[in-house]
Image (cartoon, rainbow, N blue to C red):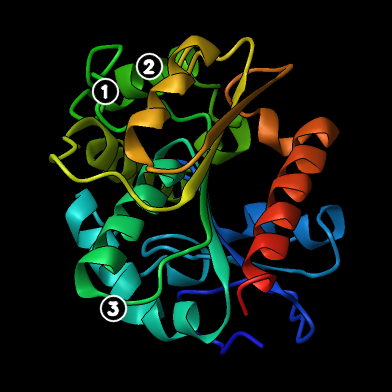
Amino acid sequence: MVTNTKWLASVHGNAGARLRLFCFPYAGGAANLFAQWWRKLPADIEVCPIELPGRWSRWREEPVRDMATIARLVVQHLADQFAAKPYALYGHSLGGLIAYETALRLREIGTRLPTALLVSGRRPPDSPLYRLPLHKLADDAFIKGIAEHYEPIHPSVLAEPDSKAMFLKLVRADMEMFETYQAKPAAPLDLGIWAFSANADRAAPPSEMHGWKRYSTREVKTQVFDGGHFFIRDSEAFWRALGEALGSCASERSAFL
């Protein structure tokens, strides 16, 4: 099973799993987002939520503000976990970019690559920012911008000064990572990519998800669901599709073992 580490949280151990799914959250999100996904996915998938610095049990740590650093740190601390068993990388929104950059970093150092990259709510890496940057705005304007382009921050988070300050620091750092990111030229990855989107998501419209085909030498599959940017939180159809994608990854991998 997965070894306990501060980089992994909410892992429901599954010694009999054929495939591990390492999950990266969206901006401001944490590993607990994926805590119950093991109930939604096939029994032979071990869900491994990644806890990034600056949130939940790691709230005392400084959040990372640039993509190259977070990809390097993830690989540095989790390379042994990746090497132990066939695995896939999944991320939503900002998490999708982190998953992609992590795969590039893994290829760079010559370690085992994931069987697949699965992203949701995230346009291709070379897509320009579709709006003005938010991370340098004053708090009130920043909060308004997050609500306009994604969803409102829950009032309970903003009601208490300390929790408000802590959360805004984290989200601002994540938005800086996202808004300053520029994809460097890189050869396509030799692995399949699944790109999931929602029909009412302005941040990652379905029409742009086919651009992920530029990033793989293998098949890239796209699928559209009902909902907005955070459709993954309550879409049974998405979880079924994700389970089917992972099932095919596990079966394909098993055929070569």
The three-letter amino acid code for the residue at tag 2 is: Gly
- Answer with mark 2 or mark 1, whichever residue precedes in sequence: 1
Mark 2 and mark 1 residues within 8 Å of each other at the beta carbon: yes
Q: Residue at x 71, y 44 (%)?
A: 242
In this rendering, position of residue 42 left or right of residue 24:
right
Element at badge 2? helix
Q: Give the crowd class for mark 1: few <14, some 14-19, many >=20 residues within 10 Å.
A: some
Q: Give the crowd class for mark 3: few <14, some 14-19, many >=20 residues within 10 Å.
A: few
Mark 1 = which residue? 134
Q: CA distance from mark 3 to mark 1?
A: 30 Å
The three-letter amino acid code for the residue at tag 1 is: Leu
- Answer with mark 3 or mark 1, whichever residue precedes in sequence: 3
Using the rendered view, name the quadrant where residue 203 is placed: top left
* Percent x, y of residue 26: 48, 42
**Which label number is shown at residue 145?**
2
In this rendering, position of residue 216 left or right of residue 17:
left
Q: CA distance from mark 2 to mark 3?
A: 34 Å
Q: CA distance from mark 2 to mark 1?
A: 7 Å
In the rendered image, which quarter contains the C terminus?
bottom right
In the rendered image, which quarter contains the N terminus?
bottom right
* Percent x, y of residue 78: 41, 78
Mark 3 = which residue? 76
The three-letter amino acid code for the residue at tag 3 is: Gln
Q: Give the crowd class for mark 2: few <14, some 14-19, many >=20 residues within 10 Å.
A: some
